[in-house]
Image: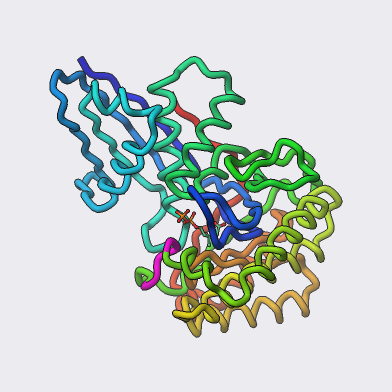
Amino acid sequence: MSHTLKARYPSNIALVKYWGKYGNQLPCNPSLSMTLDKAYTQLQLTLSEKHNHQIEFEYYFEDKLNEKFGDRVLRYLQGQKEFSSLLEDYALRLESHNSFPHSAGIASSASAFSAISAVFLHATNPTLSQNDFNRQASHLARLGSGSACRSFYDSYVLWGHLEEIPESSNEYAVPLHEIHDNFRSMRDSILIIDEQPKLVSSSMGHRLMKNHPYAPARFRQGKEHSKKMIVTLKNGDFDAFISIIEREALTLHAMMMTSVDYYLLIKPGTVFMMEQIFQFRKETGLPICFTLDAGPNLHLLYPENIESEVQDFLEGYLQTHIKSIINDRIGLGGSVN
Ligand code: DP6
């Protein structure tokens, strides 16, 4: 006997960055993200009854057996006591597809691990209320990849404890509900500057924050920015929004450039486009800003009502400085069935 479950979970883009962790995947500062819409992982779990004690687990990514990521997923599953009976009683097959190209600089571990934890939690405990499900799945997803814990909720999501938000926690993410109309229909145009796989993983980047000379100041700043961003999302202040987001992106990369084993993930094309964005904003006064993940590709954030001006502006750089553009937008959390 076998049965299947399906999950679809989005990626998210951090406005305030998680960079540095302690203990069991706990963040050194709170982070705050926007959930994406078009960038998601579609996951199918097939459970087939088995009668031996051997683990039978296969992970397929884009229809191909992927042993490397499969080993990481299996280690993660074996580490969660909630999932031990599933591993014992069933042969498990995961089939994963991303709606976005691997090289796009979209956090694929965020959508993958949110989908994986959701589908396994649902298989173990299908009767949880929506609230309990999201909280437990967010907690479990965090143990697989930190940023994944923020993919369970719509729009804007906080992960990390802040005194001002009583339900907030370092263990799981919580949704932010008080959002000004200015920030409700945001666009995220992802400018693909470079498609090469990055040379230094995020896990290594987090580790390099351990003895980083600027770490204490950075963790204080991340906390202050999270608090300010929550207020900004309520009051609709675009200037504050832009200033926090760009400072966060540049600080993230400054941390990479100033760690003991320093490295650089941005490319000349990244710097060129950042300068064009500064210039475009100065000339037009339009509320547009950029952020970066741990890679060279820029995420341009702006409200829906200036979409045509932004697309005209970007048109001028397509093919010359930008390889391609993925036009995403603010989205809803995922679901499993
Ligand atoms: C720069 O969540 O990928 O995207 O917990 O080791 O899997 P692990 O790290 P990961 O780090 C994300 C870093 C970031 C910032 C962010 O998403 O907050």
Residue at left 52%, top 75%? 256
The residue under the point 52% across, 78% down is 259
Q: Quadrant where the C terminus lies?
A: top left
Image-quadrant location for residue 243:
bottom right
Horizontally, residue 320 falls left or right of residue 54, namely: right
Q: Is residue 198 above or below residue 91?
A: below
Quadrant of residue 45 in the image? top left
Q: What x and y, as percent, mark residue 284?
A: 78, 74
Left or right: 26 in relation to 66: right
In the image, residue 173 above or below residue 83? below
Instruction: Name the quadrant of the N terminus.
Output: top left
Q: Is residue 328 above or below residue 240?
A: above
Q: Is residue 39 visible?
A: no
Q: Residue furthest right?
A: 235
User: Who's the residue at 50% across and 59% down the image?
Assistant: 326
Residue 228 among magenta residues: no
Which residue sits at x=45%, y=63%? 202
On the picture, is 112 further left or further right than 138?
A: left
Q: Which residues are magenta?
A: 199-203
Residue 38 appears at what percent x and percent y? 50, 47
- The colour scheme used to paint the residues is rainbow
